[in-house]
Amino acid sequence: MHVLLESFLTDIFEVLPGLVIRGLILIVLFIIWPKLLGMILTTYKKTLEKKNVDPLLESFTVSLFKTIAYIALFFVVVSIIGVKATSLVTVLGTAGIAVGLALQGSLSNLAGGVLILFFKQFSKGDYISNNGGIEGTVDQIHILYTTLITVDNKVIVVPNGQLANNPVINYSRKPERRLDMVFSVAYDTSTDKAKELLKQIAENHPAVLKNKAMTIRMVKQNASSLDFNFRVWVKNSDYWDTLYDFNEEVKRLFDENSIEIPYQKIDIYNKTEK
């Protein structure tokens, strides 16, 4: 018994220094690695900014480098612990199908990010929406996802594959945008009078591009109203302010000219049997 205990203690004392050294190396590595990586990425970002590289390409490559760096850290840690890299690769190879299935979505998103950067479907600062009803201003693109900022300052994280493989509406790509509105008047309103007032509003607004065609025509005889299409062109930056201006100005001018803006009405008939 004494011999076994002595042998056990001897083995521990032989192994303990190695474990302590490995532990200290791991602690130092975990402290230094993030700082070193941060310094490298900061230098890399400054270099790209000086060369006026696309901000989305910058955020994508930074995200890619971070991922590669932490994968490298994983293998270094595994090596320090004592697990051979070849053994780890063998295990991953054996579980290749399961790993492949698990990473299938991630690889699709990685490929989607590359496609977005290659075809430049949108740039940083563009306002976009997809067919899923998600919309916002493009902020950054990472290796697996893109971040959008909504008008009320919420952050939306969208997988790259979703943006690369589905229709995307880019509202910011063109400098000019057509403003489409519909205004309704009561049936007893003169069509010519309504068109004249709407045209007056469009021609007097400074944001309306006068070199572009405008459309002011009756589009529908609705159940209780005459509906007019009101289409003018404005600069992209003036779109929302102009839309609000027109709604306010049409109400004011219609009131001044005693033109009724119809609202939903229900006529009730009381039939009395004789």
Image (cartoon, rainbow, N blue to C red):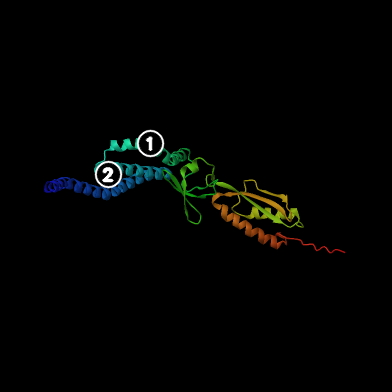
Q: Taking 274 as reference, is 114 left or right?
A: left
Label 1 crowding class (10 Å Cα cut-off): few <14, some 14-19, many 20+? few
Q: Nearer the viewer, residue 220 or 197?
A: 220
How far across and how far down the image is residue 227, in percent? 70, 53
How far across and how far down the image is residue 200, in percent? 67, 55
Q: Is residue 121 visible?
A: no
Query: Looking at the figure, which quarter contains the C terminus?
Result: bottom right
**Residue at image mark 1:** 96
Of labels 2 and 1, the one closer to you: 1
Q: Taking 41 as reference, is 6 left or right?
A: left
**Residue at image mark 2:** 77
Whether 258 is drawn above or below 214: the answer is below
**Identity of the amino acid at label 2?**
Val
**Identity of the amino acid at label 1?**
Gly
Q: Nearer the viewer, residue 125 or 96?
A: 96
Whether 157 is drawn above or below 94: the answer is below
**What mark, if any, has residue 84 been given in the picture?**
none
How far across and how far down the image is residue 28, in percent? 24, 49
Q: Nearer the viewer, residue 221 or 237?
A: 221
Q: Is residue 251 visible?
A: yes
